[in-house]
Image (cartoon, rainbow, N blue to C red):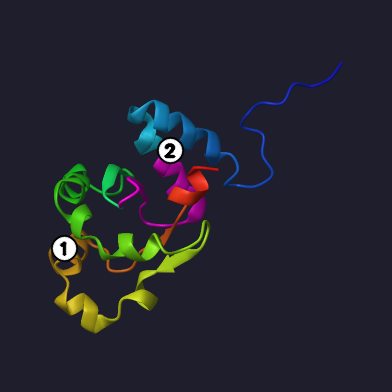
Amino acid sequence: MAVRRSRRDNSGPFDALIPDLYDAVIEPQLWPDALLRVTDAAGIDGAHFLFCSSDGLPLLSQMSAQISDETNTLYRDHYGAIDPRRDRIQKFGVGEFLLCHREFDNDFVRRSEFYNDFCIPAGFRTWRAFSCTTATTAMR
């Protein structure tokens, strides 16, 4: 008799997270738990999952439970539109990482509303970001 494998069976710690992310897209109330699992697996302080339109404007912004709902609301309602990472990440290939401390030096950060009024008061200066898909890869 064959043993039926669960969809949670995986070959690595992040493989088990993929079904959670798909489930959260369909059922948005699952985002906090899904992102908490991402932060636990990666050993990071917080996670932000962002979906953008083809012109780069945020359509959906969800942050892990370690980041306050107020911070997510501020991002969604204002700071997402001026997030300098969006323009850079759209030029990256799928899976390429953007490391903010390499892309935005201290002089840039000092002049940036996004960093000074949003990121730093919320408790984070450095972000790591990557593109899951692009407008061209999504059409394939």
User: What residue is drawn where x is 48% and y is 33%?
Assistant: 22
Closer to the N terminus: mark 1 or mark 2? 2
Circle number at residue 69: none
Q: Amino acid at mark 1?
A: Pro
In the rendered structure, which amino acid carries the disc numbered 2?
Answer: Ala
Residue depicted at 46% across the width and 29% down the height: 23
Look at mark 2 in the image and give the residue it sits on: 34
The residue closer to the viewer here, 25 or 140, is 140
The image shows residue 109 at horizontal and vertical percentages of 22, 76
Determine whether label 1 and label 2 are within 8 Å by CB. no
Q: With 20 as the anchor, is 62 left or right in this view? A: left
Q: Using the image, determine if residue 100 lies above or below residue 57.
A: below
Q: Residue at x 30, y 81 (%)?
A: 105
The answer to which quarter of the image holds residue 65 is top left
Quarter of the image holding residue 111? bottom left
Q: From which residue to which does the magenta span run?
A: 35-55
